[in-house]
Image (cartoon, helix red, strand yellow):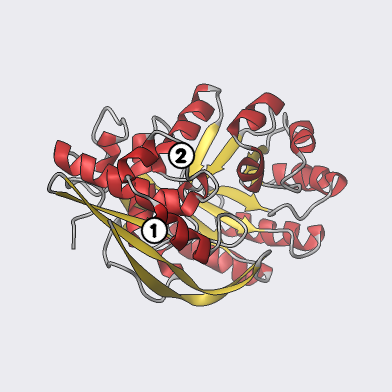
Amino acid sequence: MRIEPFSLSLSTPLDTAAGTIDERRGFLVRLDSDGTPGLGEATPLPGWTESLDDCEATIRRVDDPESTLDDDSLAAAPAARHGVSLAVLDARARAAGEPLYRHLGATASTEEVPVNATVGDGEPKATAEAAADAVAEGFPAVKLKVGARSLSADIERLEAVRRRCPDVELRADANGAWDHETAERALSAFADHDVAFVEQPLSAGDLSGHADLRGGPVGIALDEGLHEHGIDAVLAAAAADVIIIKPMALGGVDQAADVGRRAIDAGLDVVVTTTIDGAVARAAAVHLAAALPRVRACGLATRSLLAEDIRENVAPIRSGAAVVPQGKGNIPPS
């Protein structure tokens, strides 16, 4: 097994709770399994996975890549496990002569996965124009970032979008910005504009608060909350209607598939998204979404956030859907 470092510049710097990100750094993981090549990607993200240095050190300590699928020795380094396990799964799928999503358990061929567009924190007119552009491009769902402004300002933005886009599915992502009272007022106002669900209205730690917010016309989605507590706690607390699955943060597409199937079996909806990964991990996330029996429009249209990529034209977005690779494994080997 060998690893190759890479660095991908972002099109625009991204402000996160862990600081500003202007590049995505990670490692390609290459291995040979009985003559069959496998390729994985480990791209750690501050706040979601281990550090870049810890990721590299963990990968270099792996003696038997195959064993990473069957034990929890890399549990503390989810990005490293993602990279190694993806390389193993890629090789296995190639050896079996099937695309990765079929190897992950899909029972039928899937050509594409619906995806959502994301609109940032702009003024009402700019937000509505961006949403209208996304609808014109064929996106079935639009997610608005909320919580950075006052609630009244976000409601004004939402109203502007709904006027311009009367039929599109609208979602909002608060990233844990609200307290309980503000979240209740937001959900009441958002219901008037047919918002499908709100991601992480409260802080990640507040499972009981999210459970209290459920039951109305606007669903509750957990992203950071799933990452912090795990699927067992989320289901036990009945804290979500929707879960947001990030394979890199969950330690690989195999573990993410298990989480997704458990959520679906419990009656929850699932959205697969990326952590602004390179083409190898992004394609694997598309395969994951195709492998699950039911997903909402997923957050997989993230290539545009990168100024450059590991490989071009991999799982491209066309008319609001990600094209699922149909060759052997994850993507064709380079």
Helix, strand or loop at disc 2?
helix
Position of the C terminus by quadrant: bottom left
- Residue on which disc 1 sits: 60
Viewer-side residue, 165 vs 269: 269
Q: Position of residue 173 (x, y in %)?
A: 64, 53
Q: CA distance from mark 1 to mark 2?
A: 23 Å
Helix, strand or loop at disc 1?
helix
Left or right: 207 with respect to 248? right
Q: Taking 53 as reference, is 62 above or below it?
A: above
Name the N-terminal-most of marks 1 and 2.
1
Left or right: 244 with respect to 314? right
Residue at image x 68%, y 71%? 123
Q: Taking 118 as reference, is 326 above or below it?
A: above
Q: Taking 99 as reference, is 8 above or below it?
A: below
Q: Position of residue 207 (x, y in %)?
A: 74, 36
Q: Does residue 194 appear in this view?
A: no
Q: Which amino acid type corresponds to the residue marked 2 in the rendered image? A: Ala
Q: Which amino acid type corresponds to the residue marked 1 in the rendered image? A: Arg
Viewer-side residue, 221 vs 168: 221
- Residue on which disc 2 sits: 256
Q: Does residue 158 appear in this view?
A: yes
Q: Residue furthest right?
A: 181
Q: Position of residue 19 (x, y in %)?
A: 65, 70
* Mark 2, other Cα within 10 Å: few <14 / some 14–19 / many ≥20: many
